[in-house]
Amino acid sequence: MDRRAFLRSTGAVAALGLAGCLERLGFEEQSAWRDPPLVEDRPDAVYVPASSEEMGVYGRATDWEYGVELSYTFPHRFWTVSGTDRNRVVVGADDTMHLMVTPWDAETDTVLPLEMRVDLLQDGERVASEFSPPWPMISQRMGFHYGNNVVLPEEGEYTARISVGPVSVRRTGELEDRFDSSATLEIEFVYDRSDVHDLEFVQIEPDRHGERDALSLMDHDTHDHGGQTDPDSHVAMELGPTPTSQGPPVEDLPGTVLGTERSGDAMVSAIETDRDRFTDGDGTYLAVTLRTPYNGVVLPFTALTATVERGGDAILDAEPLVETVDHAFGHHYGVGVDALEGGDKVTVSVDVPPGVARHDGYETAFFEFDDVEFTI
């Protein structure tokens, strides 16, 4: 019986504790994740994948500006992205786990797109050099994070030395004049093979494979911390719950919502606001959010432009939108404009797709965008 046949035989939805189950049936350890099922005839859009995996958490750390969480799951495939080109990364025979880092602002709980390096140390010596830098990526269960498959030489104690920052995108509001420099945070963890192998592998109902929908985001705080983080510790209490990469609801943003359209299977929303931190009291500000459908996860590292036409004339002509993080708007793209008037037409173009790696269910979406229009 091959692995696909075994998974099908478990029924429509099966939560599999892989540690001993596959071994008892005679499978090699890595067969549990080296070739997981992939949906056939995938749409050029977000879709329900054939399977998903549980996540474990090794710990969190903060320097009271940056906060980070180190988590893990089975090693698994993903696709790196360069413009509209995709490169499939397959699981290697020696891959130990898929290691993930979520970075955020410890004051406002805003998940941050930034520069990152992760060194894995054993007894003070660097191991697993291929892990760093991790890829910025999106998955349906984790949202936006940084990660890669990693090879560890053996079970035992390790230190993850995580260098985060600076944040190169524009920062406004309570994030202004912050994150100009990097910080190094360390999380100690114990790699125990059984911790990874005992995570659940979930086979999705076959009739949902390829459906235009997405799996729900994980709740980080309900997952096992691997014995490394004490929820009653000072750090855990100060950091609070690990934030998700969902953007704040568009309808709750301060300003006038011009509308929401779907393009490239992403949700594109435009908001006009007169907040002084964006305009310096002159004109108005056009904020554009770009998010995944269903879960509303932000899509960073994208190039967008906006055009505003009034009476047939362009008062803003293909102006680049500046990638920005703000305590209220979260991650978005924006530009200052003259105050908008009734009848104005706002056109938003996505010139370069999101430069993030993708896991199953996202790898076919967010590439081919049509312009979206909003009429005042």
Image (cartoon, rainbow, N blue to C red):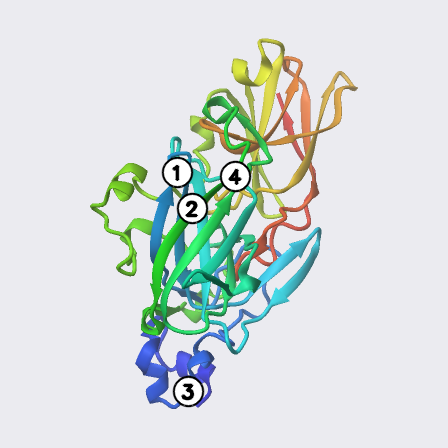
Callout 3 amino acid: Phe
Callout 1 amino acid: Asp
Give the secondary structure at mark 4: loop
Q: Earlier in the sequence, mark 3 or mark 1?
A: 3
Q: CA distance from mark 3 to mark 1?
A: 44 Å
Q: CA distance from mark 1 to mark 4?
A: 11 Å
Residue on which disc 3 sits: 27
Label drawn at residue 185? 2
Residue 43 in sight: no
Badge 2 vs badge 3, beta-carbon distance below 8 Å: no
How far from the left and from the top, in percent, is residue 47?
52, 58
Residue on which disc 1 sits: 63
Callout 2 amino acid: Leu
The one nearer the camera, 333 or 11, is: 333
* Classed neighbour count for the residue bearing mark 1: other residues with Cα under 10 Å, few (<14), some (14–19), many (≥20): few
- Position of residue 317 relative to residue 55, above or below, is above
